[in-house]
Amino acid sequence: MLTFRLLVGILLSAIGASCADAAQQKSHAQPPNIVLVFVDDMAWGDLSCFGGTGAETENIDRLASEGVRFEQFYVNAPICSPSRCAITTGQYPQRWRINSYLDNRQQNRRREIANWLDPAAPTLAKALAENGYVCGHFGKWHLGGQRNVRNAPLITQYGYEESLTNFEGLGARILPLNNAHDGKGPQRYALGSDLLGRGPVIWRDRAYVTQEFTRSAIQFIKGAVHRDAPFYVNVWPDDVHSPFFPPKDLRGDGSPKAVFHGVLDAMDQQLGELFDFIRNHEKLRDNTIVLVCSDNGGEPRTGDHGPLRGSKATLFEGGVRSPLVVWGPGLLGDGVKGAVNRESVFAAFDLPPTLLEIAGVGADKMPEADGEPLVEVLRGESDASRRQPIFFRRPPDRDVIPFYGKGDLPDLAVRAGKWKLLCEYDGSEPQLYDVVADPGESNDLASDNNRVVERLVRAVTEWHTAMPQDNGPHLADRE
């Protein structure tokens, strides 16, 4: 009898362990691995799987054909640093006073924004590392350690065991040599990073920096496999951010569009090494989830925003809607291969709590997250949306931008259901669009929907006033 009870106890323990993570429907020997590819300045329609025609992004397209593609996914800011803050913390970036791209101390002070992300902030990497994951960051950081900000925390203080970044972060860095292939010698492009210290620096042809990030990520993953540890890896390339320097054979006629498409093509090829490594590794293929998205819209002269209005630095759809591809043959729902989700409305800050659930760690490890766990959505098993609206505030230095044409840009925006409202800080000058029917935001319906306007203006202005303020109103008055 004792032996029988012992056997039953062992069996029940085994069953309990296999079911400990209710979010995981498929059993794995260890928690799933996570790879997040966060591309700099890639527009919603740049990828060929999202309708782009300028470059053949065959490697990312293959992920989409084997996984799920999302068409109503948002980032939480139309510019780099705050967008990166949101996907790192699961919170609105305004909570950490990161409201525009981080610059030198003088410009940060002028805009009343932080010099770096407070290392006390919750991060996805910290939550995973505290639960057995090894975490690495390879690529652009831009959450501290840029220009003349030499005393920012190292990337490894945010939960990452290893990091390799560019000129907008500290620690080990790859700095680019911009080679225009015009007969002139390569030019160093460091924006002062080579003078900051705080980590070893190597120089590399700009056209192959992503290759270095990718190969470093692969080596890190090999180390994690050797240690039999689950991993979370960021690969955050910055090729698609100007200035553009593709390999010589991908420059085309040398026009801005041609060199842009060249860097997009080259980036896709270099990321392909990582994707193929995971796909062909017997221990990784069925227990790794790969996500590919962009930090904000593209530049107006080069990015392909498809039917969307606006571009980088604006709160219109072209500035804040991002392509999202999710791949994971052993982790996604059955029968979702090649699926396209055109219904689910969610944002980058929803990814940390969602990934914590998928990892079996639990979203409650980031209890102050503004994001919501959407496991079934990310797995392709549901077309639900997040429950709460998504709020936006423009960068304080992006009210009137000559680069984007004349005109006053909206200060605030909110996406709620099919509605998208944009307005000034005080709620004046509201614009209302049904962005399901009108993703180009061309038909302003504000005058015909007073109650909707009143409700959304109240919601977005209350959110705005509840957040730490920046110098946007004052800078707008001066421009």
Image: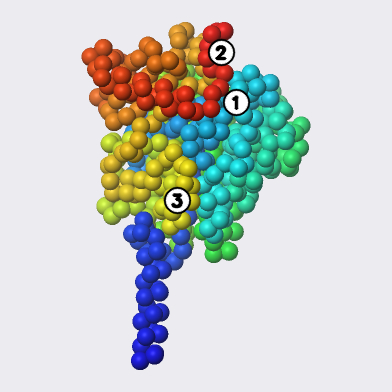
Q: CA distance from mark 3 to mark 2?
A: 38 Å
Q: Which residue is mark 2?
A: 474
Residues at badges 2 and 1 in contact (C-beta under 8 Å)?
no
Task: Tell me which residue sits at (57%, 18%) in the image.
Answer: 471
The quarter of the image holding the C terminus is top right
Q: Which residue is mark 3?
A: 364
Q: Residue 13's x, y, as percent?
A: 40, 74
325, above or below 147, in the image: below
Residues at badges 1 and 3 in contact (C-beta under 8 Å)?
no
Q: Secondary structure at mark 2?
A: helix
Asked whether residue 282 appears in the rendered view, the answer is yes
Task: Tell me which residue sits at (37%, 78%) in the image.
Answer: 11
Near mark 3 (Cα within 10 A), the count class, few <14, some 14-19 or many ≥20, is few
Q: Residue 271's x, y, as percent?
A: 50, 43
Q: Residue 426's x, y, as percent?
A: 43, 15
Task: Tell me which residue sits at (26%, 16%) in the image.
Answer: 450
Number of the front mark, 1 or 3:
3
96, above or below 469, in the image: below
Q: Which residue is mark 1?
A: 113
Nearest the viewer among 198 and 263 is 198
Q: Secondary structure at mark 3?
A: helix
